[in-house]
């Protein structure tokens, strides 16, 4: 009996030592990406934007290449933390790019583009997209670069380095990464960085199209953080509008962008933490939301996609200044083949 107790004691000491070692590792590696960072622009673009001419812009959360229609994610109540395989990441990334290329988009705003992550089997998705969109300029920003996460235990999500990106057929200038507010209590240690990209596209009339790409937090218990993220983004956009520029912000807002799209698809509005209606009271004067609820832009990943059964909603879209004429906004029905999101394509004209 004494020998058994001795071995139990040794095992407990080992477990405690490993746990303390991991906590020490997390705290030692903890840092936040600085705010207001200049970003490098890669590639060669064509001519500047013209007023009175129609263009196409898309926003698409490509879900780090993991989410084909069969994938379920542990944080949504599903099974997996990582993509099924490297081949799955390659196929889903290529499929997502092909949809945008088929749509002939001039500008693409992309979220959850991994660079070197365990969850996406270290596929450089950003490099793949750069090759596929060779006639577009590219600007990217690290959204988060997280320490190794050993949870869930059956398939640890591991270390993640993920970005958001802008692809444009037109020249981009003064691209910068701006940080979004995150949790500030002890949970900030595991709360991921969030950011948005702001870049300027010169126009023939001497103004700028100030273009924003954002991916807001999803799994937050503190709605004040959501509010602070929206206020930070809106403040910067309002400054550009008041300076006389055109403004388009696209991305994954992790809010119901029409306010009741979930209801239209047969589900309860706000039944998910990331599905609350977008608080339109925070929109500055001169701005409005452009989103499509004829088909959903996002599904819950608690199960493989089952039409009519899986929770769906529109959380992706655009916020646009009133000097930008929106001719059409449309969710492209991919049946969630390459991501848990569908691309949203908007045709617009600068007035």
Image (cartoon, rainbow, N blue to C red):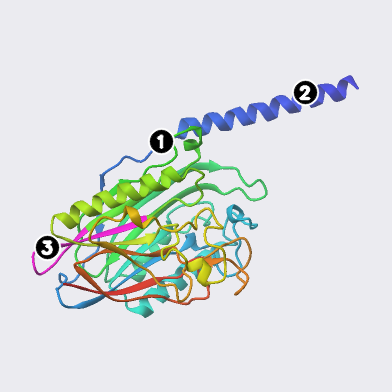
Question: Which disc number belongs to residue 42?
Answer: none
Look at the picture and state if 3 lies above or below 152: above
Q: Where is residue 174 shown, x and y percent of the image?
A: 19, 53
Q: Quadrant of residue 205?
A: bottom left
Tell which of 289 and 304 is nearer to you: 289
Q: Earlier in the sequence, mark 3 or mark 1?
A: 1
- Foreground residue among 160 and 193: 193
- Residue 62 is situated, as x and y percent measured from the top left of the image, at 45, 64
Is residue 339 visible to us here?
no
Query: What kind of element bears circle 2?
Result: helix
Residue beneath label 2, please?
A: 9
Is 74 covered by the magenta stretch? no
Say if residue 155 shows up in the picture.
yes
Question: Is tag 2's residue or tag 3's residue first in the polypeptide sequence?
Answer: 2
Which residue lies at the image location 38% right of the left edge and 62% below the top edge? Answer: 110
- Foreground tag (2 vs 1): 1
Determine the secondary structure under disc 3. Answer: loop
- Residue where numbered disc 1 is placed: 31
Is residue 204 highlighted in magenta?
Answer: yes
Q: Quadrant of the N terminus?
A: top right
In the picture of the structure, the residue carrying the numbered disc 3 is: 207
Residue with the most extreme top position: 2
Residue 88 higher or lower than 122, as above or below: below
Q: Residue at x 64, y 51 (%)?
A: 155
Start and end of the magenta stretch? 200-214
């Amino acid at each position: 009996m004494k020998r058994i107790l001795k071995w139990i004691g040794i095992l407990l000491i080992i477990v405690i030592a490993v746990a303390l070692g991991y906590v020490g590792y997390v705290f030692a590696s903890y840092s936040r990406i600085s705010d207001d960072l200049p970003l490098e622009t890669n590639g060669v673009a064509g001519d500047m934007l013209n007023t009175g001419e129609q263009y196409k812009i898309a926003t698409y959360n490509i879900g780090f290449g993991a989410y084909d229609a069969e994938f379920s994610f542990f944080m949504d109540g599903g099974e997996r933390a990582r993509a099924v395989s490297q081949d799955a990441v390659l196929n889903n990334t290529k499929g997502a790019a092909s949809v945008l290329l088929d749509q002939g988009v001039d500008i693409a705003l992309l979220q959850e583009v991994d660079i070197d992550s365990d969850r996406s089997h270290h596929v450089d998705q950003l490099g793949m997209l750069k090759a596929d969109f060779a006639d577009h300029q590219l600007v990217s920003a690290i959204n988060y670069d997280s320490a190794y996460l050993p949870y869930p235990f059956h398939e640890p999500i591991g270390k993640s380095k993920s970005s958001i990106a802008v692809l444009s057929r037109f020249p981009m200038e003064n691209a910068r990464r701006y940080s979004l507010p995150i949790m500030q209590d002890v949970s900030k240690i595991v709360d991921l960085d969030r950011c948005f990209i702001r870049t300027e596209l010169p126009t023939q009339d001497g103004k700028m199209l100030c273009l924003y790409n954002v991916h807001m937090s999803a799994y937050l218990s503190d709605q004040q953080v959501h509010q602070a993220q929206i206020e930070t983004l809106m403040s910067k956009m309002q400054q550009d509008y008041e300076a006389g520029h055109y403004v388009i912000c696209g991305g994954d807002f992790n809010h119901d962008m029409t306010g009741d799209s979930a209801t239209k698809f047969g589900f309860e509005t706000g039944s998910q933490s990331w599905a609350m209606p977008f608080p339109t009271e925070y929109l500055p004067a001169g701005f409005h939301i452009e989103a499509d609820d004829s088909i959903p832009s996002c599904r819950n990943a608690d199960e493989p996609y089952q039409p009519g059964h899986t929770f769906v909603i529109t959380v992706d879209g655009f916020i646009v200044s009133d000097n930008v004429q929106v001719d059409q906004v449309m969710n492209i029905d991919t049946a969630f083949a390459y991501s848990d999101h569908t691309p949203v394509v908007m045709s617009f004209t600068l007035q």
